[in-house]
Image (cartoon, grey):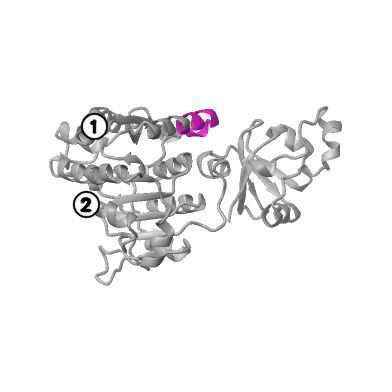
Amino acid sequence: MTNIRKSTLQHVKKVIIKIGSAVLTGEDGLDLQIIEQLVDEIAELTKQGYQIVVVTSGAIASGKHRMGISGPLKSMPQKQAAAAIGQGRLMRVYSNAFGKHGIYTAQILLTMSDLTDRKRFLNIRNTLSTLTEWGVIAVINENDTVAVDEIKFGDNDHLAAMIANITEAHLLINLTSTEGLYDKNPALSKNAKVISLVTEITEEIEEAATADTTSVGMGGMKSKVIAARKVTAFGIPYIIAPGKEKGILHAVIAGKDKGTLFLPMSEHLTSRKCWIAFTLRSRGKLIIDEGARTAICEHGKSLLPSGIIGVEGNFDVGDPVTCVDQNGLSLAKGLANYGSQEIQKIMGLKSSKIEQVLGHKDYDEVIHRDNMAVEK
């Protein structure tokens, strides 16, 4: 097992470290001792040449503690207010801890809409690249103060996965309050054991992950496994590890048998196709016939109008749409070259007929293969 880990991690240089609320918080709000412990390790790793980006939770928990709130927050405005109160303190704690090592930090707050726009996505990538060149540690969190359901990541597991794609990281370490992914729910079974290695995310693996969350966290183990599916599709190894254990980051990167390692897929998507598959939210559906399914899924072809037998939703040119078979099974997601009303007019026709029907023909394909991510 150790040999697999060492061979998987031997060329790692760019690392995303996601730190969950259950790791960062204690009875008195932020656990300053744990934060300093992790920062000391990160600082040492940067001196060894590793390029590290931190995705952190903890703002809402910090704000709740400041306001003396012990129970769950009941509304979105309360969560946003707590985040506004807690985020400043959270960054100050990180800044002071890294400052002891002579390392500067940079705060980046994001919402989903920052990543669904391709230009802003690339701007974030360029900013993170520059910060890395300057030796600055980017500390990223969701912008909970303004985020609503339509633009929320849902939890920082998903955010960390997106950051891994943006930065083209070599490894994502998800630090949590458990030892890793268990084969059974450890709260219900004394025989539960940590799964050390996951070569493929099967139904059994997904069923082993519970959706239970802590009082200070947003995402349970199920969220972490969903994030693992995305990250490994990028071709990046993903590790769930116990964040409160001293020396955990050094142990993980050294290839020691800590936590759960999810191996990357051998055939992975490009960064752009990952952006299409996992970041963009579909605006409609294209129902395709068996011939189109075979062409797209088995031969890597574009979607032509002749293979479309139905259109659902109202979308424009350039919008993300999902391709489904006649049973409603999702097959792929891509960027449409034509709007929904135009596709309704040309579906089932050969590409040579597009101009005759629409009065123009900008593309032969409804979705070009370069702008399509096929589901495995």
Question: Can residue 83 be seen from the camera position used here?
Answer: yes
Question: Can residue 207 be seen from the camera position used here?
Answer: no
Q: CA distance from mark 1 to mark 2?
A: 20 Å
| Magenta span | 115-125
Name the residue: 43% across, 59% down.
8
Q: Is residue 189 above or below residue 104?
A: below
Q: Quadrant of the N terminus?
A: bottom left
Q: Quadrant of the C terminus?
A: bottom right
Name the quadrant containing residue 134: top left
For badge 1, the amino acid type reads: Ser
Instruction: Name the residue nearer the viewer: 52 or 339.
Output: 52
Name the quadrant containing residue 163: top left
Q: Is residue 39 above or below residue 341?
A: below
Q: Please identify the dominant SS of the magenta region.
A: helix
Which residue position is annotated with label 1?
95
Q: Is residue 297 left or right of residue 180?
A: right
Name the residue: 42% across, 30% down.
130
Instruction: Name the residue nearer the viewer: 133 or 351.
Output: 133
Instruction: Name the residue nearer the viewer: 172 or 2.
Output: 2
Indicate which disc residue 244 carries.
2
How packed mark 1 is, by other alpha carbons closer than 10 Å (few <14, some 14-19, many 20 or more), is many
Task: Name the secondary structure under disc 2.
Answer: loop
Q: Is residue 105 left or right of residue 340?
A: left
Indicate the position of residue 216 as horizontal and vertical percent values: 24, 44
How packed mark 2 is, by other alpha carbons closer than 10 Å (few <14, some 14-19, many 20 or more), is many
For badge 2, the amino acid type reads: Lys
Closer to the eye: label 1 or 2 = 1
The number of numbered badges drawn on the structure is 2
Q: Is residue 347 left or right of residue 196?
A: right
Name the residue: 68% across, 41% down.
311
